[in-house]
Image (cartoon, helix red, strand yellow):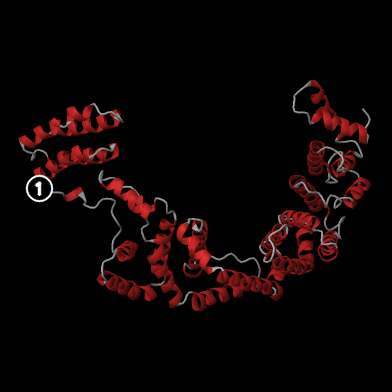
Amino acid sequence: MNLSFENLVSTLTCASKSERSLEQQNADSQLKKWETVPGYHYLLQDVYLNTDQPLQIRWLAIICFKNGVDKYWRGSRAHSIQKDEKRQIIARSMDLINEQNNQLMIQNAHSIAKIARFDFPLDWPNLFDDIVNNLEKYVFVENNLIATYNTLIILNRIIKTLSTVRIGRARHAMQAKAPIVVSLLIKLYSKFFTIWTTNWTLQSHTFATCVEEFEENNPRGIRPTAQGPRCGGVFEQHNRSSTGLVLGHEKYKTDMLKNTSSATASSLRSFSILKKVMAYVYRKGAVTLKQRNDKMEVQTAISKLSTQFFTADLVQNLCDLIINWYLRLKPSDLESGYWNRRNGVMKSWLVVGNTVRPCAENFYQDLIKYFPDFLAGFVLNKIGSGLMENVTVDKILVRDSILCTFQLSGLLKSPRPSSPAVVDDWDFSKTDFQPFLNDFVKLMLGLLNEFSLTESKLYLLNALADVIEKCNPLVDYQTLIDILQIIPPNWETGESEQIIKTSLLRVLKSWLFL
């Protein structure tokens, strides 16, 4: 079959059918044969640029085009795409700019980025200039938001792709074009932020894409421009505008924080950021330097953070915030504890429904470790004043948080390495424990009848077996008979029979070897 637009559309139609048939297999084979025929990729571009074609045909065409660019665009490859065909493809690469199908546009952006990876800057030197000119036209002349959004998607994908280049001129050439790109992004950011704060329409997506462009530009090798005063100015503007929004709607935000858990993810990220910043400043680890002037910038940043950011007021306010909010028990925690305490199950019920608490505890320990001078007296005063206040429901919860901070401070650093056991049995004396032995065993046997959970019974039976094993032959006759009497009724339990039987056999084994 000869390669033509009509034959290609017909073959793509057969290949895109959902039923697997001989006709579809023949169409796939024909597409593979055409991959090395001159003009094939140009015609594929014709198909997916033609909005009159069905979406399924256009989708298959752009996938084949993207894969073909990956395999045959580089000039050193066998059956590579000819230069004339490349120039024609590049000339039409931005013609799909008004496409409303987001997934098709993303695939088009991937294809353009792959071409830029091979041809920029040698064979496509005006890539970024064309994108900047198009954006200015779409935003400030035509007010074409769809074209603006699609162009930003393409720019985002190109920056991501070119930033991964390690050999060649592409990355350095992109850095040279960074000033014009960042300058335009700042103007777009200012324009769309103003629109976004007044009307939630399609501009919100375009504004979000502008923000993503800044996120991509800053860490991906365009540092001199990103560190300039213009970039700093736009973030200062964003902070002022965001602060105004927060202050203007403070009441609603406070109500949401009290009644919903939507802030959990933000709290986790905030703790993670602060923890990394503190470790960067105070841990004194190795610092990776990418440029010669980085050392001075790192020292300046550390000095500002340690003297101007982490002040005594900030550290104490963070500690106070953790005590009053993040270590404080919630009704769901208390309900969970009520159902578990009757069975003596040592579960982490304190964190049920509150995944932020472990992070807050870990962050508090970092605060104590890095700022002992700021927090030692503060925590002691907190404990003294908190324990002396009148007892109310609210004060009891705050008091529990204060005692929790005291516990965390004590566990931070012990004079000797902590042992996995509370009491070391190396020098355990059976005769010293004998006066308490029978009473302890009777209490354990009494508790066994009250427990209903299998896990609780396992803890108790294992402890009973250890007591009998360590204290033989000091257990008296009547206590041994009482131990034997618990085995028959617990042998035929309804749930988890094998687990309970294993623990009972261990108790019986300890009893037999007395």
Q: Give the percent coordinates (x, y) of residue 321.
A: 42, 68
- Does 335 sit left or right of 260 as displayed? left
Q: Which of 494 and 154 is in front in this view?
A: 494
- Badge 1 local density, few (<14 within 10 Å), some, or many (20+)? few
Image location of residue 236, percent across then percent down: 64, 74
Quadrant occupied by the N terminus: top right
Q: Is residue 285 visible?
A: no
In this orientation, which residue lies closer to the viewer: 367 or 6? 6
Residue at 71% x, 74% y: name it: 230
Question: Residue at (13%, 30%) from the top-left corner?
Answer: 485
Which residue in the protein does label 1 denote?
Answer: 436
The amino acid marked with disc number 1 is Phe
Image height check: is 230 above or below 220?
below
**Vertical placement of residue 376 versus 219, above or below:** below
Quarter residue 301 falls in: bottom right
Image x and y of residue 176, in percent: 78, 66
User: Can residue 347 be seen?
Assistant: yes
Numbered disc 1: secondary structure:
helix
Q: Which is more toward the observer, 347 or 73?
A: 347
User: Which of the 4 quarters of the picture holds residue 18?
Assistant: top right
Is 110 displayed left or right of 348 in the figure? right
The quadrant of the image that shows the C terminus is top left
Looking at the rendered structure, the number of numbered marks drawn on it comes to: 1
Q: In which quarter of the image is residue 294?
A: bottom right
